[in-house]
Image (cartoon, rainbow, N blue to C red):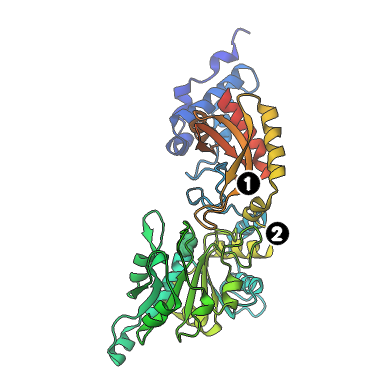
């Protein structure tokens, strides 16, 4: 038979016109989809698939096309990279998301058949993880936790305004703790958006207990301590710990940011919820997706009456978390050590042996190097984590980012470094495949 099947292999344009590929073209771009088409045509010419199966093969090979979010390997050495979605979730949390995605008993008590407390499991897990907290509540993120605290404690309300004649209430905060949290968002603006007034005390580098004591008055709604989680001030500095502010007659709220629930030996300067509560903080606020290693969420921990007041505030309804977050948070709290913590705690020796394994597989110009990683904007500023990785020519950074399985590396000193501190070991095979493709 002279009907050579190779002649029936569809042309690239014809395959690209298949309507099923439209979403992939929109999200992945024509060049990327074309690569997959060419590969499938090659398999058809080699007789591995029939020419008629080319379009199906392309459709099956393309990464999930319904969403524009792509899975990437974080080889930046920044454990908590906000642009990469901060903490990767544990397998247990991912499984929990799968269950929560369907219909669940998030607010139903299956025993009585009546209404249950929303997210009771996640809240119980959080309370168990921080026994010093009399009450716990979860919001959409750390910023929402702060907004809720500021609104309920310091913004005052119309009823109060008319009965007392007082206007807005004040939040006393150290000038050196008026931080910008990223992407142009500033905590002072966030707090003032609630209607509360900020009363700054101290100077950029120093603040004393007396500054707070002088500022606290009948209009004070709360004292706010904010952990400078993305910068360090060194030199002639002083700040006032929570323990010295608890006798000023107003609630002390401590925004620790990172979500460490208890002290961590590798991060001695990072504040944690248990220590702040024991020091007398009325309320601690934190994020769920930083060092806690869970989903985006805001944690509110502290005095039972205060937390109850926040939970019943009308604004709480607008800041509440969805069932997916509750499921992932509970699994993170109850489950094994989440990836962020495992990455933080990995001995540098095992990173070194992984980097030399990778280099021996991919060969030159890849080179095993020592480097320095960091926790990231979400915590432990200035802490240098010893690390190891794979160095490549700097031009490969873009190639790796644009590859079929994108890898985000760090460019430093004229080279592209794949820092293994932020790469879970199970992703080494992805790194090897990506580097091989980039070098090909
Ligand atoms: C990250 C951070 C926030 C904001 O938390 P989100 O969860 O990102 O909303 C607020 N305060 C501090 C100190 C932080 O580190």
In the image, is 235 to the left or to the right of 123? left
Q: Quadrant of the C terminus?
A: top right
Give the x, y percent position of residue 392: 57, 30
Give the x, y percent position of residue 349: 72, 43
Numbered disc 1: secondary structure: strand
Check mark 2 vs ligand 1: CB closer than 8 Å? yes or no.
no
Between circles 1 and 2, the one closer to the viewer is 1
Q: Which residue: 54% across, 37% down?
A: 406
Spatial CA distance of label 1 from label 2 is 24 Å
Q: Quadrant of the N terminus?
A: top right
In the image, is 277 to the left or to the right of 232? right
Front position in the image: 299 or 9: 299
Q: What count of labels does the image hold?
A: 2
Q: Taking the image as drawn, is residue 282 in sight? A: no
Q: Going by the picture, which residue comes out furthest to the bottom?
A: 163
Give the x, y percent position of residue 286: 52, 66
Q: Which residue: 48% across, 78% down?
A: 252
Q: Which residue: 48% across, 73% down?
A: 240
Front position in the image: 387 or 66: 387
Residue located beneath label 2 in the image = 336
Q: Quadrant of residue 391?
A: top right
- Vertical arrangement, residue 150 with respect to residue 266, above or below: below
Q: Going by the picture, which residue comes out furthest to the front?
A: 236
Numbered disc 2: secondary structure: loop
Q: Taking the image as drawn, is residue 66 in sight? A: yes
Residue located beneath label 1 in the image = 386
Front position in the image: 131 or 426: 131
Q: Earlier in the sequence, mark 1 or mark 2?
A: 2
Mark number displayed over residue 350: none
Q: Are marks 1 and 2 in contact (CB under 8 Å)?
A: no
Assess disc 2: are there few (<14), some (14-19) or many (≥20) residues with their C-alpha within 10 Å of its C-alpha: few
- Vertical arrangement, residue 373 with respect to residue 142, above or below: above
């Amino acid at each position: 038979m002279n009907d050579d099947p190779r002649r029936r292999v569809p042309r690239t344009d014809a395959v690209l016109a298949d309507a099923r590929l439209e979403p992939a073209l929109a999200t992945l771009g024509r060049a990327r989809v074309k690569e997959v088409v060419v590969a499938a045509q090659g398999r058809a010419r080699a007789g591995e698939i029939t020419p008629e199966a080319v379009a199906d093969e392309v459709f099956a090979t393309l990464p999930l096309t319904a969403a524009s979010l792509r899975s990437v390997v974080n080889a930046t050495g920044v454990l908590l990279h906000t642009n990469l979605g901060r903490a990767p979730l544990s397998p247990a949390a991912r499984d929990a998301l799968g269950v929560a995605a369907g219909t669940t008993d998030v607010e139903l008590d299956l025993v009585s058949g009546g209404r249950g407390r929303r997210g009771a499991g996640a809240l119980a897990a959080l309370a168990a993880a921080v026994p010093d907290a009399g009450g716990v509540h979860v919001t959409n993120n750390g910023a929402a936790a702060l907004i809720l605290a500021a609104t309920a404690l310091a913004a005052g309300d119309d009823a109060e305004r008319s009965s007392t004649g007082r206007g807005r209430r004040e939040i006393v905060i150290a000038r050196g703790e008026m931080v910008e949290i990223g992407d142009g968002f500033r905590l002072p603006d966030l707090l003032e958006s609630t209607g509360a007034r900020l009363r700054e005390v101290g100077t950029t580098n120093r603040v004393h207990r007396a500054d707070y004591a002088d500022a606290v008055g009948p209009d004070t709604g709360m004292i706010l301590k904010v952990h400078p989680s993305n910068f360090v001030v060194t030199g002639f500095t002083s700040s006032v710990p929570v323990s010295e502010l608890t006798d000023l007659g107003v609630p002390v709220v401590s925004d620790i940011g990172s979500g460490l629930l208890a002290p961590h030996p590798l991060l001695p300067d990072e504040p944690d919820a248990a220590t702040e509560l024991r020091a007398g903080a009325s309320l601690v606020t934190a994020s769920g997706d930083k060092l806690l290693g869970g989903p985006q969420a805001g944690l509110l921990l502290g005095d039972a009456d205060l937390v109850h007041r926040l939970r019943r505030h009308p604004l709480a309804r607008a800041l509440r978390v969805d069932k997916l977050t509750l499921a992932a948070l509970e699994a993170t709290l109850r489950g094994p050590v989440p990836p962020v913590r495992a990455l933080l705690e990995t001995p540098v020796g095992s990173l070194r042996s992984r980097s030399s394994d990778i280099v021996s597989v991919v060969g030159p110009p890849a080179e095993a190097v020592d480097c320095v990683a960091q926790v990231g904007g979400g915590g432990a500023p200035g802490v240098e984590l010893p690390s190891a990785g794979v160095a490549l020519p700097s031009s490969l950074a873009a190639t790796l980012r644009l590859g079929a399985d994108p890898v985000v590396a760090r460019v430093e000193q004229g080279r592209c470094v794949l820092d293994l501190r932020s790469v879970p070991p199970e992703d080494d095979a992805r790194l090897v495949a990506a580097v091989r493709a980039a070098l090909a």
